[in-house]
Amino acid sequence: MTKTPQTLTIAGSDSGGGAGIQADLKTFQELGVYGTSVITAVTAQNTTGVAAIYPMSAESVREQLTAIGSDFEISALKTGMLFDPEIIKETAAAIQQFGWNKLVVDPVMIAKGGASLLQQEAVEALKIHLLPLAFLVTPNIPEAQALTGIAITDSASRHLAAQRILSMGAESVVIKGGHGKDPKYAEDYFLHSSGESVLYRSSRIATMQTHGTGCTFAAAVAAQLAKGEELQNAICTAKEFIQAALRVPLNIGSGHGPTNHAAYKADLAVKRGVDSIEVFR
Ligand SMILES: Nc1ncnc2c1ncn2[C@@H]1O[C@H](COP(=O)(O)OP(=O)(O)O)[C@@H](O)[C@H]1O
Ligand SMILES: Cc1ncc(COP(=O)(O)O)c(N)n1
């Protein structure tokens, strides 16, 4: 009997349900993998912003990680909001202890409304302890700039920033283009430590409902990896997933609303297909 692939998200809770743990579990469910979770912080949050952050203690994070590691067979995992250096160290230690592979690190730093989801001193901890364990790192443009100190203004500086992130020990990186300036396209740039690069391009959707796009994208990559999909195809599926989730808005809340996690599967079910993604290798 084949078992459902098991996945793990290590991230913050978003009370509004659009980002963080909630977005990750919805994405896992939609893509047909079993989702487990380790909560690093509880945020009081809705579509208009983050009102408060309550980080979990390092001990409670360790206990959650141990509960997962001692019982589940994790085929792929992702990290999101990790908040402080202690939580990052506990996370890295557990990943090594339990031998978890296929780690997708979404280096969450700042929420769309401007709240800081990662302490300044935790950026170094992320680079030292977590990036060397990463199969894929998925920064958005501001995060890639913060990790590298390189201003991303064109494709050459984006490539340089990607190279710099790989030099920190990650096996591969995709710099996401949601924050890019191009009004027509949202372009994600993938670079592997072998030197191979891929550009994933979709039409840019004009919408305010972008809360949780990064979390959802990284969770979709992890889900596909858990099912055994090869990395570059997993990224393409994640891009299709987020494209569908943005294209069919839910119109929830008065601010940056959540994406529609159910749209991808609904599209496939009626065989409408999702917007095709252009892939340049
Ligand atoms: N308006 C948009 N139209 C189409 N794709 C988008 C749009 N905004 C973001 N994306 C896609 O969503 C994913 C998350 O990107 P991004 O918004 O940069 O991440 P984050 O949520 O971490 O800031 C990427 O694949 C990106 O290309
Ligand atoms: C708990 C939590 N984690 C992550 C994000 C980032 O959201 P986004 O994916 O929109 O950048 C968030 N707003 N809240």
Image (cartoon, rainbow, N blue to C red):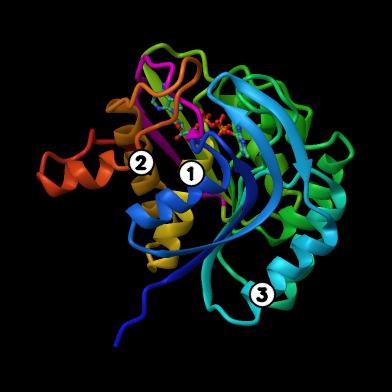
Answer yes or no: do the residues labelled 2 and 1 have beta carbons within 8 Å?
A: yes
Q: Which residue is mark 2?
A: 261
- Say what secondary structure mark 2 lies in: loop
Query: Which x, y percent locates residue 259?
Result: 40, 32
- Say what secondary structure mark 3 lies in: helix
Residue type at the position of mark 2: His
Q: CA distance from mark 2 to mark 1?
A: 8 Å
Q: Which residue is mark 1?
A: 23
Marks 3 and 2, the one that precedes in the sequence: 3
Query: Which x, y percent locates residue 255?
Result: 50, 16
Classify mark 1 as within 8 Å of ligand 2 or not, answering yes or no: yes
Above/below status of 68 relative to 273: below
| Residue at image coords 51%, 13% | 181
Query: Which x, y percent locates residue 247?
Result: 29, 26
Magenta range is 195-213
Q: CA distance from mark 1 to mark 3?
A: 22 Å
